[in-house]
Image (cartoon, helix red, strand yellow):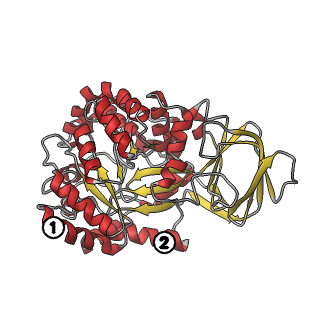
Amino acid sequence: MSLLLVVLLACGEKAPDRVALGPVEAATVVDVSVFSGEGDAALPHQDVFIEEGRIRGLGPTGTQPPRGRVVAGAGRTLLPGLIDAHVHITAAPFMPGALHLPDVSDNLQAWLVAGVTMVYDMGGPPRMVAATVRKLASGEQLGPRVRWSTATITVPGGHPIRAIKALLPRPLGSMLAGQVPVIAHPDEADALVAELLRDGPEAVKIIADNLPSDTPKMDAPRLTALVAAAHARGKRAFVHVQREEDALMAAQAGADALVHGILGGRLSEEGAAALGRAGLPIVWTGSGFDATERLARGQWTASAMDRALFPAALLATMEGAAGLGLGSAPVVGQFAAELSPLRADWGENLRRAARAGVPILVGSDSPLPADLPGSSLHAELQWLVEQGLSPAEALRGATSAAARLYDESDRGVIAAGKVADLLLVEGDPLTDIGATAAIVQVWQGGRAVQRLR
């Protein structure tokens, strides 16, 4: 990252804090239904004990006296803290050309308010992400736990270079686009990956598709060389795809996960079966694509959670006819227009992949215009259920299954001894997935999240 860019980002106006964290305390959630993050059902009438930042036990209501602060659980469901498996913590949710810099702190705190206690950053400015991770670890910054990948590796002129230039005002867009790592030949893979891992990322992110369709695209030799270089250094390789051919190429190359679903055409039964045999998790991000397409047609409206989390002035730049500005913008407008005829296949593609045994993880790709931090993960859960997943399948994809992507065995489930990253909601999200947005309390490491605004 250039010195000028660091200065520009440092000078951005910081929003006031959204949250504070209470002390690590003892607490008991009494008479609550518990969805552990695994299985298909919740366990009713449970008392859950939290001490020293961990879940110390759970059992039928009344079998042990409550300890510490008592939290009423009747009529409510306790879930593991949600995991957003595809975000960009340094991005900003503004329309193309907006003269507004990202507020990383505000992004992170929005996720936490929304019950998202862990996120996977899928490609951002490495030094900026690394600095944020250090601040989170020291307590200087409040937000979810962040696991992160390298900046996205693409081919010369490939995605996201053109999109960055289109979305951001000059000279910021050109400066950031110039920071995107590119690979011209397979022989460059080893040195490129070694260089990108110096800042400490935990995985390698690779772009295998082309957005929009006239953008240069990765080929199999370069992709295979990049995945091999990541694995040689003990790192996972996450591959950005859109079409069946991209996904199968990534599976053949040995990728560890796909970080978009099949949203660029039809997924055949044969292709779904091949992905199922590969056991390759897919972070689907369907609602983000849906929001982009509706935004560009002037048909996006904010959700209730969007309105609860974000100022009306921001939402007004996107809702209704205001969104037509994205549709007329270069590059991103073309991409949005290309999505419209593809929408009819999205639900069947998801169902075919799930039937074939493909693990479906939940990610938002936020923040982007109309794809806002925190609320967009709840929109993705809703979208997945509307397209055919059961609520339990969707919730596993945002808890236990997502935790396995980074071997986060201490999180993503409710069980004795696990970290007390928890979400308490009104109602039963296993019968109404929208209940995940009816948030009563969030805990991070046993500390209650206290909303300030």
Asked if residue 413 lies left or right of residue 211, the reply is right
**Of discs 1 and 2, which sits in the foreground?**
1
Q: Is residue 425 above or below residue 132?
A: above
Report whether 200 appears left or right of 29.
left
Q: Earlier in the sequence, mark 1 or mark 2?
A: 2
Distance between the Cα atoms at labels 1 and 2? 33 Å
Q: Which mark is residue 188?
A: 1
Q: Mark 2 belongs to which amino acid?
A: Lys
Q: What amino acid is labelled 1 in the image? A: Glu
Query: In terms of depth relative to the viewer, which is nearer, 332 or 119?
Result: 119
- Disc 2 target residue: 135
Mark 1 surroundings within 10 Å by alpha-carbon count, few (fewer than 14), some (14 through 19), many (20 or more) = some
Label 2 sits on a secondary structure element that is helix
- The label number, if any, that marks residue 66 in the structure image: none
Picture coordinates of residue 63 (x, y %)? 87, 49
In the figure, is residue 146 to the left or right of 204? right
Within the image, what quadrant is residue 225 found in? bottom left
The quadrant in which the N terminus is found is: bottom left
Q: Residue at x 87, y 47 (%)?
A: 62
- Residue 4 spot, x, y in % from top left: 25, 71
Please tell me which residue is depicted at 49% across the width and 54% down the height of the picture.
Answer: 404
Near-viewer residue (283 or 369): 283
* Residue at the farthest top position: 344
Residue 111 visible: yes
Q: Percent x, y for residue 422?
A: 63, 52
